[in-house]
Image: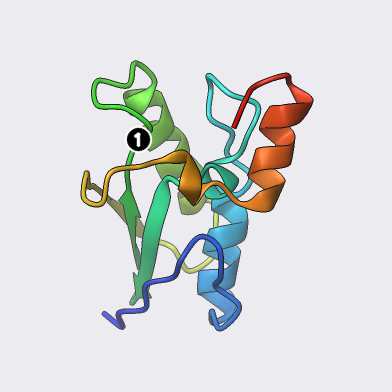
Amino acid sequence: MTRRTFSPLFHAGAGPLEARVWSALAEINDPEMPINLVDLGVVYGVEVGEGVVRVRLTFTAMGCPASDMIVGDIREQLLKEPGVDDVVIDVVWDPPWSSERLTPEGREALRSWGLSV
């Protein structure tokens, strides 16, 4: 497996499949907030190789009630991508998520909903 880990804030050097994976992840909204997972900053990295996509993911809080739903949504969305045969999701807690990980688009989305960031 070729290891390429991308910051959710900058992944311009991604190959075609990696770019599609990031785009697919950006289509998945957090079920509790009006923001996609990439702009929320919970996707810590993506590795792609030989039909397998590995996603490093965190949550905004331990015990997130939507964690199973988010993992299921990621798996379902990525398996739709041509060339993806399997999805491995590694939930990580280090570094812990903070609002510093929000993209500018994510901050704006939350502000437009009246949420302080």
Q: Nearer the viewer, residue 107 or 48?
A: 107
Q: Three-letter amino acid code at disc 1?
A: Phe
Residue at the location (48% across, 52% down)?
Answer: 78
Identify the residue under disc 1: 59
Q: Nearer the viewer, residue 38 or 69?
A: 38
**Image quadrant where residue 106 sits:** top right
Q: How many numbered marks, from 0 up?
A: 1
| Residue 60 x, y percent position in the rendering | 38, 32
Outermost residue toward the right?
112
Image quarter where the C terminus lies is top right
Residue at the location (30% across, 79% down)?
Answer: 3
Residue at the location (58% across, 23% down)?
Answer: 33
| Residue 37 x, y percent position in the rendering | 52, 42
Residue at the location (63% across, 34% down)?
Answer: 35
Q: Along the horizontal axis of the image, is 96 left or right of 72?
A: left
Against 30, residue 40 (above or below) is below
Q: Along the horizontal axis of the image, is 107 left or right of 66?
A: right
| Residue 96 x, y percent position in the rendering | 28, 44
Q: Nearer the viewer, residue 5 or 104?
A: 104
| Residue 1 x, y percent position in the rendering | 26, 79
**Image quadrant where residue 48 sits:** bottom left
Identify the element where label 1 is drawn.
loop
Against 27, residue 8 (above or below) is below
User: How is the model colour-coded?
Assistant: rainbow
Q: Along the horizontal axis of the image, is 12 left or right of 59?
A: right
Is residue 51 in view? no
